[in-house]
Image (cartoon, helix red, strand yellow):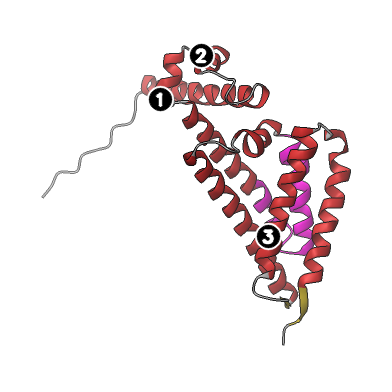
Amino acid sequence: MKKKIAKQTPSRSALRRQREKEQRYNTILRSAETLFAKKGYHQTSMEEIGDLAEVSAGTVYFYFKNKEDILITLLKEGGFHFRKMIGDAFRQADASVEGLKNAGVVFFRDFCVQHPEKVTIIFREAVGMTEKVESVRKDLFKRMTEDIKQALLRISEKLDTAYRSDLSAELLAVCIAGLYGRIATYYLIWDDRSKDLMNIAEEAVLFTIGGVEKLVAAKKY
């Protein structure tokens, strides 16, 4: 019989070193996020990221291959955070039209207003970059659109209605994702109108709901 090898519990010093590594990693990431949003990706150097994180440029390179690697990490992180917030808001309203409204409000109030750096990374700094960055960004928006599409289909199912065509839910999802992204870009990045954002959000959400109602054809039989 093979002898079972007991798993060794990491020592306190090993656990402390692991915590320190994780903390350093997050500090570098947050520093890069701040600088990319404030100065721009191209205008930020690895040395500046290290300086703000209070580590050497060599330490930054230890955790990330290059600046592009940091941008991709931030893009994935921001996208995950965004999708989770919107998904939670929709699920809490039990797949209803009200849930769709709540998800729109959460996007503007909780994501855009509370995380302007993430908005800037996703909608400005990751645009027009390398093929690798664009591939990650494309994947993010496709996932976001699919999330919205599935939410719209669940609403239709719950209301026992059907959309006008098989393309309706997908088309609406593409429009909603594009609309909300453009509003965030226009009113937060190009022209800081964050004070008006909730009024703008309310009208955008009403516009969205109107589109959904127009493309719902009739009750299912």
> How far separated are the C-alphas under marks 2 and 1?
29 Å
Q: Which three-letter amino acid code belongs to the residue tagged 3?
A: Ala
Q: Which three-letter amino acid code belongs to the residue tagged 2?
A: Glu
SS at mark 2 in the image: helix
Mark carried by residue 32: none
- Of the two numbered discs 3 and 1 on the same chain, state the one appearing first in sequence: 1
Range drawn in magenta = 85-114
Q: Residue furthest left?
A: 1
Q: Closest to the observer: 120 or 96?
A: 120
Marks 3, 1: nearer the viewer: 3
> How far separated are the C-alphas under marks 3 and 1?
45 Å
Rendered view: 142 above or below 53: below
* Residue shown at the point (53%, 49%) measured from the top left: 139
> How far separated are the C-alphas under marks 3 and 2?
41 Å
Rendered view: 34 above or below 213: above
Q: Residues within 10 Å of mark 1 (few under 14, many from 20)?
A: few
* Residue shown at the point (72%, 55%) measured from the top left: 176
Q: Name the residue tied to disc 1.
A: 15
Q: Name the residue tied to disc 2.
A: 47
Residue 138 percent across, percent down from the top left: 55, 48
Residue 59 percent across, percent down from the top left: 43, 17
Marks 2, 1: nearer the viewer: 2
Q: Is residue 21 left or right of residue 8?
A: right
Q: Name the residue tied to disc 3.
A: 173
- Of the two numbered discs 3 and 2 on the same chain, state the one appearing first in sequence: 2
Q: Which three-letter amino acid code belongs to the residue tagged 1?
A: Leu
SS at mark 3 in the image: helix
